[in-house]
Amino acid sequence: MLRRRRARYITVNWEMSGPRRQEIAGRLQPFRQYLRELAGDEMTLRTSCRVALALGVLSAVAVLTALLALQDIYHGEGDLALEWRVVRVSSLVVLVFHAFALTTAAWKDAGFPIGTTRLCEGYDCPP
C-alpha cells in the first residue's frame, strides 16, 4: 500500500501507540529487512551534542578570559576584585560544560531512552 502511494518516510511515536504497540511491531516484522532507521532517540542526543559544542566554544572563550584576568592578577594591578570575579565565572562556565558533556556521553553509553520517536525510510522501524 505504501509503495503504491510512493511513501518514503513514516514517523511512529511508540509512546502514543499505547496497547497496539506490540501489534504494530509484529505487523512490521516481515518488512524488517527493508527498513533503515533515519532518526530516533539520537535526535535528542544530537541536540544535546550541539548544546555541548556551544558550551565548549563558550568554555574556550571563558578560559582565554580567565587567562587574561590571571595575568592582571600576576602583575599586581590595583583593584583585583573584577579579575577574581572573572576567574570565578569562567571556572563555573567550564564546570557546566564538563558536567553537560559528560552527562550527554553517559546517556549515550548507558543506552538510556532519551526520546521515543523514530523516523525510518521505507515502511517503519519496529522497536
Image: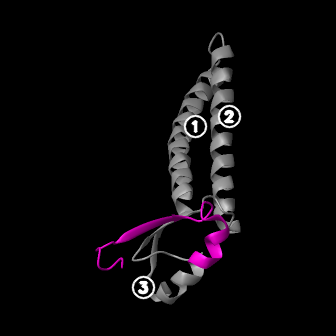
Q: What residue is pinned by disc 2?
A: 92
Q: What residue is pinned by disc 1?
A: 63
Establish if 13 lies above or below 84. below
Q: Position of residue 113 (x, y in %)?
A: 66, 63
Q: Position of residue 88 (x, y in %)?
A: 69, 28
Density class for disc 2 (Cα within 10 Å; few <14, some 14-19, many ≥20) is some
Residue numbers of the magenta segment: 1-24
**In which quadrant is the C terminus drawn?**
bottom right
Helix, strand or loop for disc 3:
helix
- Identify the residue at image location x=55%, y=28%: 68
- In front of the other: label 3 or label 2? 3
Contact check, label 3 and label 1, Cβ < 8 Å:
no
| Along the viewing direction, whichever of 27 and 92 lies nearer the viewer | 27
- In front of the other: label 3 or label 1? 3
Q: Position of residue 24 (x, y in %)?
A: 57, 76
Magenta includes 9? yes
- Identify the residue at image location x=63%, y=32%: 90
Establish if 98 lies above or below 46. above
Magenta includes 89? no
> Distance from label 3 to label 1 (Cα)?
49 Å
> Distance from label 3 to label 2 (Cα)?
49 Å
